[in-house]
Image: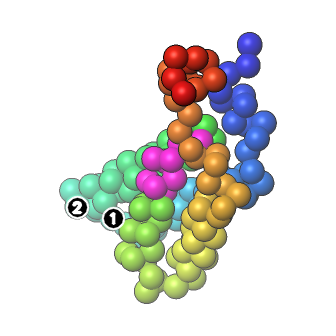
Amino acid sequence: MTTTDDLRRARRPRAVTVAIVLWAIWLVVGVLATVLVSTSDGLTGIGGVLVVVLSFVVWAVVAAAVVLLLRGSAVARIVLVAVAALRAVLSITEGGVSLVLIAISVAAAVLLFVPSARPFFRRVDPTEPSRASRPDQD
């Protein structure tokens, strides 16, 4: 039996596939940077623990959004762009790895909104019968 997810996967535009790979790279580098900063800067006390926990919660949301992106979730697309924009604003002055992460997230976000990617994120409502199957309507 073919599911809607199977059909979406078969028709996933190349731009979406590249964007998903870029988001995955962004996620891995971001998590590694969080681990390195939390261990090397010696974040101590309740404030340090809260920062690290909040960071990992955000990265978990990003990971879930990347997985949902595979299924064509338009909400996941918006969540990723919002998190990336917030992350960029908070880290724009840091330079180095942060600038690379900003560049990756911008490229990935743009790819999700190019014309060839938009149909992949359109909502498919299987409960709405088509006009062809309802002869009582013109």
Label 1's element?
loop
Relative vertical location of residue 14 with respect to residue 124 in this rendering, above or below: below
Relative vertical location of residue 102 with respect to residue 45 in this rendering, above or below: below
Direction from residue 130 to residue 55 in the image, left or right: left
Label 2's element?
helix
Residue at the disc numbered 1 = 43
Residue at the disc numbered 2 = 47
Direction from residue 115 to residue 88 in the image, left or right: left
Image quadrant for the C terminus?
top right
The amino acid type, in three-letter code, at marker 1 is Leu
Image quadrant for the N terminus?
top right
The amino acid type, in three-letter code, at marker 2 is Gly
Q: Would you say the residues marked 2 and 1 are in contact, meaning their CB atoms lie under 8 Å apart?
A: yes
Q: What is the spatial separation of the Cα atoms under label 2 and label 1, in whole angstroms? A: 8 Å
Can you give x and y, in whole percent of width and height, for residue 90 in the image? 37, 75
Q: Which residues are magenta?
A: 72-80
